[in-house]
Image (cartoon, rainbow, N blue to C red):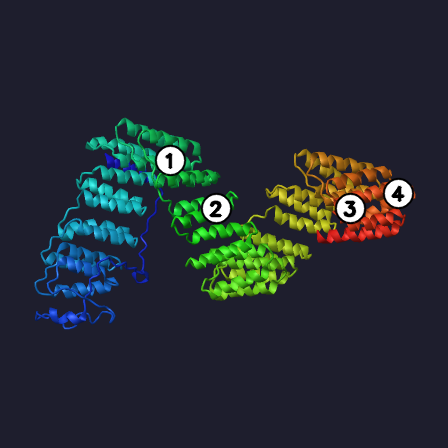
């Protein structure tokens, strides 16, 4: 039986339902007036006063601004129109009660149903039941369809158990047996509300009550199973339709195809399509579009386009949904430029792209770095009468800000206002972020103030972004003021906001204040994460408060957070700096025993500590051990050993290690070249080696440190190698982009053999470039 298949397949589905009634008082109703507005005026009350039951002021409880006009012999149709034009359901109720008292007026079934819908909008369920009872007493036939209003209204307020209870109300209070249509309506409402356990219950009740399911019933149940990712049971349910002499229709197959695509089974969806064709069930635009969407969802754009072509030969004509799907797929798969081709075809076929088409294209082009094309699409949409919305502008504004085109982004934002669109928090955030990155702090803060004065409340991202910017500029007082402003405005503060501020305070050595913010997080109910602890542990370690840092690590473990490499490396760095190798080794041992594998930073820090403590041989052994593990080490692991070897006049070993580093590790950095050049200039080795190395380093874009270069210059002058010195100076000046006047000044001194003056000028000019860097 169908019931058995559906029930058994859902038993394993972990679905929990608990209806959450909404407070009807908090619901805002927006009433859209119809084209025909029927009004009732107090001036015409005399026309209606023919009855002794006439209330001289039937609208006294309504707002004084409510004005009515209704013909004396109004019909049910007139009343329904008047009810629909009321400003709220309460006004409609007063009008309805007044109408019931009028002579010669007998309400019809549609009038009662209209009132039920009005009351359903504000969850007045007791009054709805009163209206239904009044309907029954008046002799007006209560039909099964009347109860649909109850089901729909309960579902609107997430009262799904009550919606199911309508079946009992129908049977017990009105003697009406729910038919197939009623069950289908209820089942569909439950499926849309994702109440699959209740779907199972209602379907079982339907079968036990002897109500025969139809094709729609099966389609709804198949939809429920597909949404629960129960594709196999959904297939079995389709096969079971034959027992009821029912044939799957286009919706059956389409629902299954959609379910398979959602499960990532495009092959299965295509098999369903083949079965659909075999059973001579015609493919519609809906079913074909679902398959196109399936290809696009998996990024299989070539197959999607081929499938469109194949289906077109069989009579399929792409519609707006087809084109939008293809544009979206191309943009998401990084082929936004091809999306423009689809836009051209769409226009040729006579379809007007909508806001979704344009926004998708603009977003895709912006992500692909094709901002100019995106602006052209914006111009096209305006030219074709499709007005951009805030999303359109925000996409372009955000992209322009990321590309440091803040002035253009600002102009675009002004254009947004001219179009009658108000910039939202996303608009302001993009501009503020762009201005901050560009270093325009003053304008960013100005825009922040403008944002508030224009009634656009900043959000957490706005504040966090500004706090981060202020911290990086050392303007900590202003950053702390912004946190207080967030608190006073009731703006949510997340762990990111607090982490940003703690990091800024730690970097500026204001550890005590960082600790206060850390404690404040607990009071504000904001959970501290690994980043919070690591930031403060690092700050404490750098302030030589390592015991407190260790205690904080114990606290984080008690709070269920596991220390990571950054945590251990912060403590390790402190002990290596002070030369406490035993403590440093203990940290690495603890780290390993706790399942945290040391990384290149860990080993580099430890090697540096060993060299500082004079244990160069041990540092070398550790370096070799790490290399055997296959770890690619950074310059910070090699630099301390190379420096220590040069200091011990072991230049050959130092150079061998440098060459080995170039071959097997990350490329040397500026510190490496500085150490090696200084070592060669001070080491008393062959001067040619120092000359060759300087040529090598300048060719790689590294300028020599003058203190080392001056030693080389002295050596060259002592050996009467002034020409070589001039060549080296010329090479450095070219790499450092000295101006013609600067080159002329230095070379002038060299030509007249005023080497001291030449070197002094050279030093001054070279230093000025380093400071600019």
Mark 2: few, some, or many residues within 10 Å (few <14, many ≥20)?
many
Q: Which residue is mark 3?
A: 733
Please state which of the two labelled residues, at mark 2 or mark 1, is closer to the viewer: 2
Q: Residue at x 33, y 49 (%)?
A: 17
Q: Height in image: 365 above or below 300?
A: below
Q: Residue at x 15, y 46 (%)?
A: 177
Mark 1: few, some, or many residues within 10 Å (few <14, many ≥20)?
many
Q: Earlier in the sequence, mark 2 or mark 3?
A: 2
Q: Which residue is mark 1?
A: 292
Instruction: Tell me where residue 125 appears, x and y as whole percent.
Output: 23, 58
Q: Which residue is mark 4?
A: 722
Q: Which of 316 and 533 lies nearest the eye of the viewer? A: 316
Q: Earlier in the sequence, mark 1 or mark 4?
A: 1
Q: Earlier in the sequence, mark 2 or mark 1?
A: 1
Residue 752 - label: none
Instruction: Tell me where residue 136 appears, x and y as whole percent.
Output: 12, 56
Q: Which residue is mark 2?
A: 374
Q: Earlier in the sequence, mark 2 or mark 4?
A: 2
Q: Is residue 342 left or right of residue 428?
A: left
Q: CA distance from mark 1 to mark 4?
A: 76 Å
């Amino acid at each position: 039986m169908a019931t058995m298949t559906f029930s058994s397949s859902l038993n394993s589905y972990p679905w929990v339902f608990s209806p959450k009634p909404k407070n009807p008082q908090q619901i805002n109703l927006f009433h859209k007036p119809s084209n025909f507005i029927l009004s009732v005026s107090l001036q015409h009350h005399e026309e209606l006063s023919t009855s002794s039951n006439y209330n001289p002021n039937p609208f006294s409880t309504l707002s004084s601004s409510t004005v009515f006009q209704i013909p004396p012999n109004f019909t049910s149709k007139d009343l329904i129109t008047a009810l629909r034009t009321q400003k709220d359901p309460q006004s409609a109720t007063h009008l309805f009660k007044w109408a019931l008292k009028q002579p010669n007026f007998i309400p019809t079934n549609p009038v009662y149903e209209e009132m039920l819908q009005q009351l359903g909008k504000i969850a007045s369920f007791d009054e709805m039941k009163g209206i239904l009872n009044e309907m029954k007493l008046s002799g007006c036939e209560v039909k099964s369809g009347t109860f649909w209003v109850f089901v729909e209204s309960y579902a609107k307020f997430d009262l799904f158990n009550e919606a199911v209870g309508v079946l009992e109300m129908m049977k017990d209070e009105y003697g009406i047996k729910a038919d197939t249509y009623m069950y289908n309506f209820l089942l569909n409402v439950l499926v849309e509300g994702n109440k699959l356990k209740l779907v199972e219950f209602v379907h079982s009740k339907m079968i036990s009550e002897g109500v025969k399911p139809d094709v729609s019933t099966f389609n709804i149940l198949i939809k429920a199973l597909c949404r629960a990712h129960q594709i196999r049971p959904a297939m079995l349910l389709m096969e079971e339709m034959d027992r009821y002499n029912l044939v799957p229709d286009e919706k059956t197959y389409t629902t299954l195809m959609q379910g398979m695509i959602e499960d990532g089974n495009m092959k299965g969806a295509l098999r369903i399509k083949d079965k659909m064709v075999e059973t001579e069930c015609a493919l519609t635009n809906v079913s074909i579009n679902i398959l196109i969407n399936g290809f696009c969802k998996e990024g299989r754009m070539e197959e999607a386009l081929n499938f469109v072509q194949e289906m077109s030969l069989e009579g399929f004509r792409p519609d707006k949904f087809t084109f939008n799907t293809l544009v979206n797929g191309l943009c998401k798969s990084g082929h936004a430029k091809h999306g423009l081709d689809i836009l051209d075809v769409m226009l040729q076929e006579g379809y007007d792209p909508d806001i979704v088409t344009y926004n998708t294209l603009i977003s895709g082009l912006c992500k692909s770095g094709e901002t100019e094309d995106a602006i052209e699409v914006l111009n096209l949409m305006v030219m074709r009468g499709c007005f951009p919305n805030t999303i359109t502008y925000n996409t372009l504004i955000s992209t322009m800000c990321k590309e440091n085109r803040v002035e253009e982004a600002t102009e675009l934002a002004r254009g947004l206002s001219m179009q009658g669109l108000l910039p939202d928090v996303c608009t302001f955030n993009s501009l503020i972020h762009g201005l901050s990155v560009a270093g325009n702090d003053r304008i960013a803060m100005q825009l922040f103030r403008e944002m508030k004065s224009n009634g656009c409340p900043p959000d957490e991202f706005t504040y966090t972004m500004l706090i981060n910017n202020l911290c990086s500029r050392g303007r900590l007082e202003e950053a702390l003021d912004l946190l207080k402003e967030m608190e006073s405005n009731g703006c949510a503060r997340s762990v990111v906001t607090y982490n940003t501020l703690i990091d800024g305070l730690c970097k500026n050595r204001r550890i005590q204040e960082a600790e206060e913010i850390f404690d404040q997080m607990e009071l504000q109910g904001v959970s501290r994460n690994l980043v919070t602890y690591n930031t403060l542990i690092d700050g404490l370690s750098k302030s030589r408060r390592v015991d407190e840092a260790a205690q904080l690590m114990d606290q984080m473990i008690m709070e269920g957070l596991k220390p990571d490499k950054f945590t251990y490396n912060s403590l390790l760095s402190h002990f290596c700096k002070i030369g406490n190798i035993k403590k440093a080794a203990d940290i690495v041992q603890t780290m390993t025993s706790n399942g945290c594998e040391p990384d290149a930073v860990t080993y580099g820090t430890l090697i540096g500590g060993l060299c500082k403590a004079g244990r160069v041989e041990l540092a070398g052994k550790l370096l070799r051990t790490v290399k055997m593990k296959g770890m690619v080490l950074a310059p910070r692991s090699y630099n301390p050993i190379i420096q220590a070897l040069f200091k011990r006049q072991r230049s050959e070993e130092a150079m061998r290690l440098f060459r080995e580093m170039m071959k097997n590790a990350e490329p040397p950095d500026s510190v490496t070249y500085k150490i090696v050049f200084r070592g060669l200039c001070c080491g008393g080795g062959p001067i040619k080696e120092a000359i060759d190395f300087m040529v090598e380093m300048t060719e790689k874009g590294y300028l020599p440190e003058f203190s080392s270069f001056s030693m080389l210059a002295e050596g060259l002058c002592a050996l009467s190698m002034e020409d070589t010195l001039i060549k080296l100076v010329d090479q450095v000046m070219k790499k450092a982009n000295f101006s013609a006047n600067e080159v002329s000044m230095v070379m002038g001194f060299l030509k007249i053999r005023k080497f001291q003056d030449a070197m002094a000028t050279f030093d001054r000019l070279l230093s000025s470039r380093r400071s600019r860097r």
